[in-house]
């Protein structure tokens, strides 16, 4: 949760074979604040401990305001992530607005086109790499519109986020549907939540894609058994990758694959 813990976790996951760290931060209350000082501290400590590629999730997440109310970050607060120092090598943009639902409730996850245009422009000005998360097929069309306008540079790195209520279900056929819509030269990975994560990520690896694992997406190692750590989940995916003949990329190899400085 805290920057010091995240820095150690980053090192452990790097040593286990991970090349990219997708980062959200948490304040003392355990919620996700739009406090840039926490991002600054986390990125500084992570960079001091390991060479892993840092990637900022620009959704930020829910947090507690000064009155004790839980709320989501505003679009302006999310734009503040462009001013983090030290800056991350990559940021994520979310390619469309949709209703993000769980069994505990629902909220509108706002990602209007104008916001993504402004965010991507800010990333381009700083030479920061971009990962595009698509939660539904219409989001791919939004990405292509940004590319057609010349705002989003190609080749594009896509993440298919699957299994979230309100987005596309975690079904193997939907990987194929996403792939059929990608522009030539794109790279891609699968992000799947909960009980779907293991089967869908293994399938993506077998198909030549990239994958994400970790406790943002799934807190279980197996049915009814909580994961001990992010590194435990990384170690399993590295083992499976090698078992099916795929060697995990080093950080330097990943930078080339993702077009990072």
Image (spheres, helix red, strand yellow):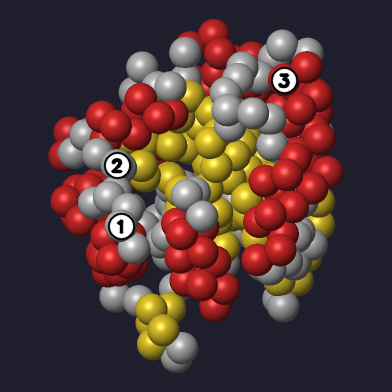
* Residue 78 appears left or right of 4: right
* Mark 2 Cα-neighbour bin, 10 Å: few <14, some 14–19, many ≥20: some
Inspect this view and state whether residue 191 appears: yes
Residue under numbered circle 1 = 245
Q: Quadrant of residue 47?
A: top left
- In depth, the one of 249 and 139 nearer the eye is 249
In the depicted structure, whether residue 177 falls above or below residue 44: below
Mark 3 lies on residue: 147
User: Nearer the observer, disc 2 or disc 1?
Assistant: 1
SS for tag 2?
A: loop
User: What mark, if any, has residue 95 been given in the picture?
Assistant: none
Q: From the viewer's perspective, tell me whether residue 179 is left or right of residue 131.
A: right
Q: Secondary structure at mark 1?
A: loop
Q: Which residue occupies 39% across, 87% down?
A: 225
Q: Quadrant of residue 183?
A: top right
Residues at marks 2 and 1 touching, judged by CB atoms closer than 8 Å: no
Q: Quadrant of the N terminus?
A: bottom left
Classify residue 83 as left or right of residue 156. Answer: left
């Amino acid at each position: 949760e805290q920057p010091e813990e995240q820095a150690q976790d980053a090192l452990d996951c790097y040593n286990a074979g991970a090349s990219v760290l997708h980062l959200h931060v948490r304040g003392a209350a355990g919620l996700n604040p739009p406090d840039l000082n926490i991002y600054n501290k986390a990125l500084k400590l992570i960079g001091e401990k390991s060479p892993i590629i840092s990637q900022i999730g620009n959704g930020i997440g829910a947090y507690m305001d000064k009155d004790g109310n839980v709320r989501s970050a505003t679009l302006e607060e999310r734009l503040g992530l462009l001013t983090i120092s030290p800056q991350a090598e990559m940021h994520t943009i979310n390619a469309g607005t949709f209703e993000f639902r769980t069994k505990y409730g629902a909220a509108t996850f706002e990602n209007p086109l104008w916001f993504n245009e402004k965010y991507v422009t800010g990333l381009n000005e700083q030479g920061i790499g971009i990962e595009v998360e698509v939660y539904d097929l219409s989001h791919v069309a939004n990405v292509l519109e940004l590319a057609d306008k010349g705002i989003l540079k190609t080749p594009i790195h896509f993440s298919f986020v699957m299994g979230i209520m309100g987005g596309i279900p975690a079904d193997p056929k939907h990987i194929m549907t996403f792939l059929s819509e990608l522009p030539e030269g794109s790279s891609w990975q699968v992000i799947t939540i909960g009980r779907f994560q293991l089967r869908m990520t293994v399938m993506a690896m077998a198909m030549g894609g990239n994958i994400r694992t970790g406790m943002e997406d799934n807190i279980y190692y197996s049915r009814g058994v909580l994961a001990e750590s992010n590194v435990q989940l990384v170690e399993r995916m590295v083992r499976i990758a090698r078992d099916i003949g795929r060697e995990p990329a080093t950080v330097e190899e990943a930078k080339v694959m993702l077009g990072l400085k």
